[in-house]
Image (cartoon, rainbow, N blue to C red):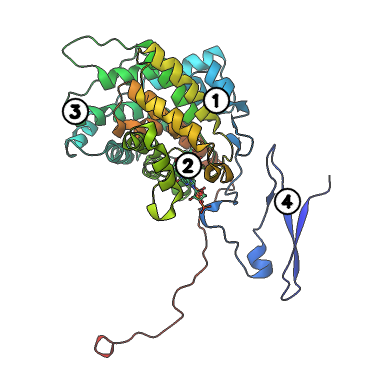
Amino acid sequence: MADKKFELTDLASGKKSLLPVKSGTIGPDVLDIAAINKDHGVFTHDPGFGVTSATESKITYIDGDAGVLEYRGYPIEQLAEKSSFMEVCYLLLNGDLPKKAELEKFNDDIRHHTMINETLLRFYNGFHHNAHPMAMVSAVIASMSAFYHDSMDIHNPRHREIFAHRIIAKIPTIAAAAHKHSLGQPFVYPRNDLGYCANMLNMFFAVPCEPYHVDPVAAEALDLLFILHADHEQNASTSTVRLAGSTGANPYAAISAGVAALWGPAHGGANEAVLAMLEQIGTVENVPKYLAMAKDKSSHFRLMGFGHRVYKNFDPRAKIIRAACHKVLERLGSTNNPLFELALKLEEIALKDSYFVERKLYPNVDFYSGIIYSALGIPRSMFTVMFAIARTVGWVAHWQEMISDPAMRIGRPRQLYTGAGKRDYVELGKR
Ligand code: SDX
């Protein structure tokens, strides 16, 4: 097929140019605008990058209108039903589902990197007991660049693989240490006889004075949530990791930047904000009042867990989590969960309201996830940390894809300058 092109005409000068069109495996074509400044002396302008393709990627595909999410071509619904988080990690990092021996080796590699340097544990004593765990986790991950700075040649594939194993293995340990610090309880070491999620729950909830039994239902629920949160193409935190990594920065520092970006309530911080919102609403009777506030721009109140930059249909992850809530709450014996009932009612009422329907504002991944985290006994301040644990593999996969691309360049957006024109300095006495 002849190369597809768009013609661009500057109507003021009549100057024309042809923009090459690139097509992917699936999804919208993109216009290659690299020559637009040379040919027309202009930049494109897209604050928030709503319609800008920042990179080519083979990792995750989203169709926001159809509510489609695929990791390396595999539909999220099938992975949620049939896969495991460790298998999804292998898939995102390597591009294909592992064979049995490959999965066993990957599990073994991860399992033998779960401990953190003992001196890192002393970092936690520098935090007040009520420090937000996202602050502790991002700080401790950034400090890992001090421990591995020498053995980190980002252009060495083996070094990149060891980095991937280390950070995926250690982030649950780092997260659990933050949780134990906030409780004033002793740190619990990882155990190599437990799976990834069971090990995390044990580090969170075990105490030295009695044996702790990890509920398999809880481990299974966490595994599902981690699969659903593992990657999501060029979201804000992943784009942050790519931009930080594009400078050649130590990858632990780049992941720490991703944790910081995820923390915001417009992004991964929404899961924590949803629970606070549901508690603030309190009863179904109050729903109309809060929906009115969500529609009133002057209120600055937003329906947390609703809306998405890409999904203009149901977030497929929200549907899966909503269904899982029913099953997990029943199996954990907390079928009477007022906040879940309120969330279901809030969704039902909002999706009949023209404001939300017209703007295609549906529940997103964060709307129901906190219900399950709460049922597992995880405190609300740790919800976004859970998101970060799961998303670490997605951040690493995108970082690896970028760093291993020979054509990689430092990311450096331009701007539309609307500030003061050139003017001369005025001495203090003359101002
Ligand atoms: C995640 O990008 C990803 O992929 C992210 C993520 C991932 O896996 O990495 O999916 C995870 O971050 C999910 C999103 C979690 N955030 C929230 O739930 C916070 C609440 N949602 C909103 O703040 C908002 O919907 C965003 C931030 C998610 C999306 O914002 P956009 O795309 O910039 O949309 P917008 O702010 O331009 O909203 C369009 C309209 C506006 O009204 P009008 O000006 O057209 O009248 O919809 C309104 C907004 O006011 N609107 C909402 C709303 N979300 C959008 N109104 C009330 N409540 C909301 N939640």
Amino acid type at mark 1: Leu
Label 2 CB less than 8 angstroms from ligand 1: yes
Element carrying mark 4: strand
Q: CA distance from mark 1 to mark 3?
A: 36 Å
- Viewer can see residue 25: yes
Q: CA distance from mark 2 to mark 1?
A: 17 Å
Judging depth in this view, the residue of 138 and 359 nearest the camera is 359
Instruction: Determine crowd level at label 3: few under 14, some 14-19, many 20+ residues with C-alpha closer than 10 A.
Output: few
Residue 419 lies left or right of residue 279; in this view the side is right
For label 3, the residue is 183
Element carrying mark 3: helix
Question: Which residue does the image show at 38% across and 34% down from the upper left?
Answer: 285
* CB contact under 8 Å: marks 1 and 4: no
For label 4, the residue is 21
Q: CA distance from mark 2 to mark 4?
A: 25 Å
Question: Which residue does the image show at 56% across and 19% down from the upper left?
Answer: 98
Q: Which mark is residue 91?
A: 1
Judging depth in this view, the residue of 364 and 44 nearest the camera is 364
Q: Compared to 207, does 384 lie above or below?
A: below
Q: Which mark is residue 238?
A: 2
Q: Which numbered disc flags the more N-terminal residue, 2 or 4? A: 4
Q: Which numbered disc flags the more N-terminal residue, 1 or 4? A: 4
Amino acid type at mark 4: Val
| Marks 1, 3: nearer the viewer | 3
Label 1 CB less than 8 angstroms from ligand 1: no
| Marks 4, 3: nearer the viewer | 3
Q: Compared to 234, does 41 lie above or below?
A: below
Measuring from the top left, give residue 67's x and y in whole percent.
60, 34
Amino acid type at mark 2: Thr
* CB contact under 8 Å: marks 2 and 1: no
Residue 197 lies left or right of residue 208; in this view the side is right
Element carrying mark 1: helix
